[in-house]
């Protein structure tokens, strides 16, 4: 099933439930085509990562001090998520911090994961997610953030 889809900055940040529904309704081929556009990809990644600090569940990260590097797509867009002192900060690229874990995956699997369609373990088993570093941190991360 092929659909025309246009992703723009108003689609994501303040309306994450709507964004999730849009992503869930699009087949992988169409989603990959939409995300092949550098502007769409940039807008979506900024919206997703900008939302992470607001979605952190503070009591689930008590005592956590971790740096997570995300490498998404090919060529990879890199984002660094720092969780410390029950807070989350996000950096595009790597600000020179050593990650505890690095997650590498394509844009479509990333979107399927963040919208709750696929879990990290399913992506790992199917070869759509590669994990380097602390596997326990990677496993626990899914519970650190609110999902719609």
Image (spheres, grey):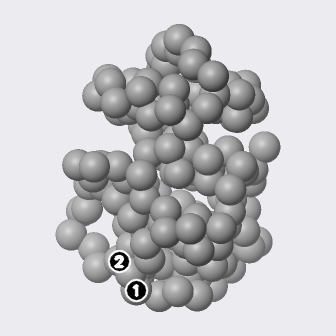
Expressed as whole percent of the image width and height from the top left, the position of residue 58 reads 71, 66
| Residue wearing tag 2 | 99
Query: Residue at the spot x=35%, y=77% of the render?
Result: 99
Crowding around mark 1 (Cα neighbors within 10 Å: few <14, some 14 to 19, many 20+) is few
Q: Quadrant of the C terminus?
A: top right
Number of marks in the rendered image = 2
Helix, strand, or loop for circle 2?
A: loop
Q: Is residue 39 above or below residue 139?
A: above
Helix, strand, or loop for circle 1?
A: strand
Q: Quadrant of the N terminus?
A: top right
Query: Residue at the spot x=61%, y=47% of the render?
Result: 112
Query: Residue at the spot x=39%, y=64% of the render?
Result: 104
Visible in this render: residue 43? Answer: no
Q: Earlier in the sequence, mark 1 or mark 2?
A: 2
Expressed as whole percent of the image width and height from the top left, the position of residue 132 reads 38, 81
Q: Is residue 113 above or below residue 129?
A: above
| Residue wearing tag 1 | 133
Q: Is residue 88 above or below residue 85?
A: above
**For this rendering, which residue is in front, 133 or 95?**
133
Expressed as whole percent of the image width and height from the top left, the position of residue 137 reads 56, 82
**For this rendering, which residue is in front, 8 or 96?**
8
As drawn, is 18 to the left or to the right of 68? right
Visible in this render: residue 113? Answer: yes
């Amino acid at each position: 099933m092929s659909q025309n889809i246009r992703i723009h900055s108003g689609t994501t940040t303040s309306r994450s439930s709507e964004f999730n529904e849009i992503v869930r309704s699009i087949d992988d081929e169409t989603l990959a085509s939409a995300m092949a556009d550098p502007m769409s990809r940039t807008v979506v990644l900024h919206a997703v990562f900008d939302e992470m600090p607001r979605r952190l569940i503070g009591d689930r990260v008590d005592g956590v001090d971790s740096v997570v590097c995300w490498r998404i797509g090919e060529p990879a867009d890199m984002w660094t998520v720092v969780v410390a002192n029950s807070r989350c900060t996000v950096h595009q690229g790597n600000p020179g911090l050593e990650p505890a874990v690095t997650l590498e995956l394509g844009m479509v699997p990333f979107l399927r994961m963040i919208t709750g369609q696929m879990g990290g373990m399913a992506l790992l088993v199917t070869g759509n997610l590669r994990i380097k570093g602390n596997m326990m941190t990677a496993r626990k991360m899914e519970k650190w953030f609110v999902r719609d």
